[in-house]
Image: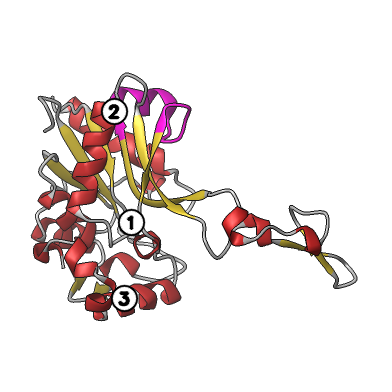
Amino acid sequence: MIEGKSVLAIVPARGGSKGLPGKNKRILHGKPLVAWPIGTAIQASGVDKVLCSTDDPEISDIASAYGADVPFLRPDRLASDTASSIDVILHAVDYLASAGENYDYIVLLEPTSPLTSSADVDTALARLHARRADADSIVGISKVESTHPEYDVRLAADGRISPYMAPDFKSLKRRQEIEPLHFLEGSLYISCTAALQRERSFYHGRTLGYEVPRWKSIEIDELLDFLLVETLLANANQFGVFEAMPRSEV
């Protein structure tokens, strides 16, 4: 809770995954992937309840063992590759509302972004709450560095390349001169419930950005991503990862 406003954290974790089969149950640095966002949400002082939405009984058992509430198994219509995330979230919100549980803020933490810390959640939540006069949601963003569009090129049918943003290669800007850009990196989403229900999205004209470092922006969609995060955690002392995440989360 934050200044009398209740907070629900939702961790969506379906059983199917084409990119990395069994992804949400796969062991990352000693615990299942789905357990990472659950632990983060539980450790966040502003979160009142952590709910895991899944269609998989085994994931349900894992989530419960790590402290999440799993009051239902997600219906089949919300467990396919084509099911929308917002429908999954609002299904959980409506389910709790039908039982008399209503929350002022919704936090979405996905297993694919296991490096988000409880401090991130609390800081972002406080930032949004302080800006409620002109903002309804806040989402994770990260600085565009090695893939800045200034250095993108077009590939012609004849195999030649040309700059995407500049008229020719001599006109390319130096890195010190390019406009700072950020990308939507998916590690953290928070919205006031009413706006989420109205907009059916965390992204709109009243959305704030919460900047995270590049190492936190890795999203696990395939084996390569999983191995990158696993390697990062195995070498955490060199990256300051454990220093940025409470020991109970790692």
Residue 200 drawn in magenta: yes
Separation of marks 3 and 2 at Cα, in angstroms: 33 Å
Of badges 2 and 1, nearer the viewer stands 2
Numbered circle sitting on residue 14: 1
Numbered circle sitting on residue 232: 3
Q: Nearer the viewer, residue 236 or 193?
A: 236
Which residue occupies 22% across, 46% down? Answer: 121
Q: Secondary structure at mark 1?
A: loop
Sequence order check, earlier mark of 3 and 2: 2
Which residue occupies 33% across, 34% down? Answer: 90
- State the quadrant of the C terminus: bottom left
Q: Is residue 192 above or below residue 175?
A: above
Sequence order check, earlier mark of 3 and 1: 1
Badge 2: few (under 14), some or many (20 or more) residues near its Cα, within 10 Å?
many
Q: Secondary structure at mark 2?
A: strand
Q: Which residues are magenta?
A: 191-207
Q: Is residue 94 visible?
A: no
Separation of marks 3 and 1 at Cα, in angstroms: 25 Å
